[in-house]
Image (tube, coloured by chain):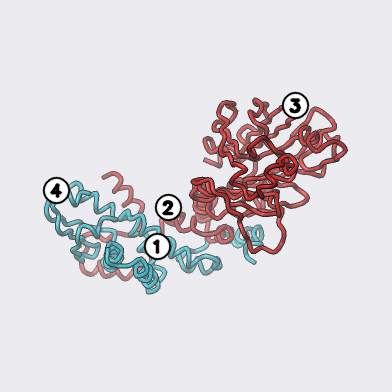
Chain colours: A red, B cyan
Amino acid sequence: MNDLETKRSRLSVPVPRGSSENSLSRNLETQHHSVVLSNDLTAEILSLLPLESLMQLKCVCRSWKTIIFDPIFIKMHLHQFQQNKRINVNENILKFIGSHNGLLCLINDSHTAGHEQILLYIWNPATRSLSNEIVFCCEEAGFCPFYGRPRQRSSWYEYRRRWKFSFCYDNSNDTYKILAFRLMSNEVRLFSSRDNIWTNIQRLPVVPIDYGDLFHGHLRINGAVCMKEFGVQDSWNQFLKISYQSLPIDSNVLIDLKQYGSRLALLPLCLNGNDDTLILAWSIDSQTLLYNLRDNRVEINITDISIEIEWLLAKDYIDSLVLNRPQYFNYLLV
Amino acid sequence: MAAEKSSIKIITLIAADGSVFEVEPNIVKEMKTVQSYIDELDQNTVSIPLPNVFGNDLAMIIEYCKKHASEEETKEAKEEFDFEFVKRMKSDDKLRLLQAASYLNMESFLQFMAKAIAAEIENQSVEFVRDYFQIESDFTPEEEAELRKENEWAFK
């Protein structure tokens, strides 16, 4: 019954009760001009609108603006639009590390080897706001950030000594995290939006690959291991394993894997809504693959896009209202 | 369901203006507010006052429920009905039905109305939307200008 009372009290229409004929007809006449929606119902409607509309409609009145920037509404909106993921293709100046809930994590790539700081940013392209810089300090001079790659040594050596970054969202406590790792020293550091600091965590249990690296018998996929609990080493889980046999590789080529290996790479781009199809970037012929998780079937994704896309550098992205300023990180994402 | 437990044959719904609607239990299944009344009472016939819903609106909601509860209707026919259903309504009708859906706690009908309204205001100007919802701006002209400027890309 309490529930019912609440439902009733949510309504703000004037309620005619046991009224005489006259007052009743007056009510019926006026009702057409006095529909005032509760904030809950307004939010229900607004959550169905795309972000461009919302950015415009925040000017309707104060209460709409409050609704649109309410953390609970932001989550509701995000949930509605979670299905409309877009794949975003890499930009040049700030390199794109990853995206969650409409926030992009970017790295300043203009630093050349020898610099001791890497700058990272969180950007919300839909609301056009950029976070303060997040500074990553490397004690050792001569490191080589992300894509900058003087190739005087073997690419494997370069790959091992480079710091690599990955952007994560921990939905257990609504925190955005940046994971930095370097194979050579087997270091892993984690930046958390909750306390805005980098902390050292245990090393990675498996070697995440850059494209072009190959392991025996199975491809290990960058990002295909997931940590169930942040900072707990035992919680790393293998998410999936794709056998060579299921890939569209010519069987003659399979015999000489080592030779082919330097060109073979798979990178997960996104998982569809039902969690049953994974889209993977495939280094051969700039294609993408559809991987069906239910029956381990692989299909080449034929797209009719005529431009060549560097799928291996692509990340998924959705519009959102999520705020990226560090001071909001702590409390706005309830 | 409660309707199966007891032997209720007919539900009487009384709207705010006193108009009376007699419906079968399967029609009110989606109205959780009504359902909770029925669950509490254990009688053959129940009459339920709905002081927050006007007769015209209740008639439309019942029409919608009847169509959607019917097993004979095809999916296409239901979609066609939905389309016509919102087409003949004015904006304030839609807003009132949304309120009624909320009061009656009808989850999918509420979603349906919210979508219909959202579709109408999507990509519309601030002025159109204010008019639609009968909202007066409470921003000062300076504040509004500032907000719009901040957001010029959205007004393109």
* Picture coordinates of residue A257, whole percent (x, y): 70, 41
Instruction: Give me the disc on residue B37.
Output: none
Query: Quick one: SS at disc 2?
Result: helix
Q: Could you confirm whether marks 3 and 4 are on the same chain?
A: no
Query: Which residue is rendered at x = 51% and y = 52% of the image?
Result: A77
Camera-side mark, 2 or 1: 1
> Which chain contains the residue that carries disc 2?
A
Camera-side mark, 2 or 3: 3
Question: Do the residues bearing badges 1 and 3 touch, measured as CB atoms within 8 Å?
Answer: no
Of mark 1 and mark 4, the one earlier in the sequence is 4
Question: Do the residues bearing badges 2 and 4 touch, measured as CB atoms within 8 Å?
Answer: no
Q: What residue type is labelled 2?
A: Asp
Q: Marks 2 and 1, Cα distance to the nearest angstrom?
A: 14 Å
Instruction: Give me the disc on residue A185.
Output: 3
Q: Marks 1 and 3, Cα distance to the nearest angstrom?
A: 58 Å
- Dot 2: within a 10 Å radius of its alpha carbon, few (fewer than 14), some, or many (20 or more) residues? some
The residue at which mark 1 appears reads as B113
Q: Nearer the viewer, residue B75 or B3?
A: B75
> Which chain contains the residue that carries disc 3?
A
The residue at which mark 2 appears reads as A40
Question: Do the residues bearing badges 1 and 4 touch, measured as CB atoms within 8 Å?
Answer: no
